[in-house]
Image (spheres, helix red, strand yellow):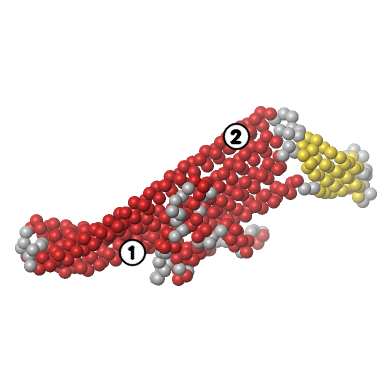
Amino acid sequence: MISDYPQVTSLSEMVEGAKSNIDLDIGFSKSLKQAIETHPSIIAKAQRLEMRLNSISALETTKDLRVTGSFLGGLQDVSDRTAGMAVVLNANRLLFDGGLIDSKIAAQQYLYGSEKFALEAAINRQALELSSTWVNLERFETLERLLDRRLSVLEPLIVQLEKVAEAGIGDVTRVTAAQKIVSEIRETKVEVEESLEQQRVRFRNAFGDIPESASYDASFISTNVPNRVDEEMINNSPAIKSDYSAYLAAEAGLAAVKAEGDFEVAFEARATTPVGGGGYSSDESIGLVARKTLFNKKQLTSLIAEAEAGVNSAMANLQSTYRRGKQEIRIAEQNIASKEKVILIAKDTAKVTSDQILYLRKQLIIGGSTLDSVLSAEARLYDAEAKEVNFLAERRMSELLILATLGILGKSLDIAVESQMNSINSN
């Protein structure tokens, strides 16, 4: 019957629930934390971690005493047509298996640890992505404001330039050069507006809306960046720990496969009792049972080779993660140091150009400078200011990358794996 089918959530309801709706009035760090904790990818990983924990509990029960019962009814002897009924009880407890079950449990526990660190790494990656979205939004908002400011200053000069061009007076070469500068500035404005709109789309997708007052908290992030990242900090990063736990799980899996070749000893008891006056006779047995598979050497050899390959793969994966993470951190450290220098240079350039513009404007009134020289200086001023904005954004990106790779970003936002799992259990 259709009514017996499991109740499922419709596609439209699931898609509607995927939309983000973050409170942006509570500040940068709190809004960011809320966005991370409610992100579907983080919730999904926490759910899988909970499933892994339950699978470990289920596997541990295989070492306990198991009691099963069967009820038999039918013909005991077909030729004599003797009918009967009986209850059969079986009890079994594993005493020795060469470490097979213990190795399987250890492998699952290490996999749980690996996925737990992987969740922590995912939280930090999500924090990096969302924070970067915030940085880029403010980056292009600032660039748009700079352009609007320059264009508002240039507007009277542009009008004057258009009149000169229409009248056909003045040096044609200079007028053409000035028109080219104006065209480049307007093209830059279109590009910045397009990039800004793209960042707004990304931000709305991540947070649900655009912040009216909350801004990226640069000081909060910068204060958490370590002065120097040493080897111990890299080795304690969530991604490295996750891969190392995966390696330990592979080693435990190899031990489990090798234990398949050992014999096992179990305590077993069996009782068959007739009921209802049936023709079955009572039968009881109790004792130790030893088992060993004798003819699967080729299969066992293949399984061991497969498990050994898994161990080697896990080792290589850890080494790859270490190399990549260390390289990214060292490049980010170098980028921060270099950006601090070029930001100061860009500031000095903007100051010099701004002073030059004041001088050129005064000279333009008395005919000592030309319109194209003023426009060119204004364009250089925007270029210097834009470089400062872009360099600052890149510096912030490098800070976020270091914090996320080391697992510090999530902790600084007070997000823990345990809190994610507790949140799932409470729901």
Q: Is residue 410 visible?
A: yes
Q: Residue at 17% x, 64% y: name it.
A: 357
Rendered location of residue 171, percent (x, y): 6, 59
Position of 64 compared to 406: left or right?
Answer: right
Q: Nearer the viewer, residue 270 or 300?
A: 300
Position of 369 compared to 343: left or right?
Answer: left
Question: Residue beneath label 2, please?
Answer: 308
Q: Nearer the viewer, residue 355 or 426?
A: 355
Q: Which mark is residue 255?
A: none
Earlier in the chain: of badge 1 and badge 2, it is 1
Q: Residues within 10 Å of mark 2 (few under 14, many from 20)?
A: some
Q: Residue at 79% x, 38% y: name it.
A: 265
Rendered location of residue 3, percent (x, y): 65, 62
Q: Alpha-carbon distance for marks 1 and 2?
A: 54 Å
Rendered location of residue 277, percent (x, y): 94, 49
Mark 2 residue type? Glu
Position of 68 compared to 111: left or right?
Answer: right
- Residue at disc 2, secondary structure: helix
Q: Which mark is residue 141?
A: 1
| Quarter in which the N terminus is drawn | bottom right
Q: Is residue 188 visible?
A: no
Q: Residue at 48% x, 48% y: name it.
A: 230
Mark 1 residue type? Glu
Q: Residue at 48% x, 57% y: name it.
A: 409
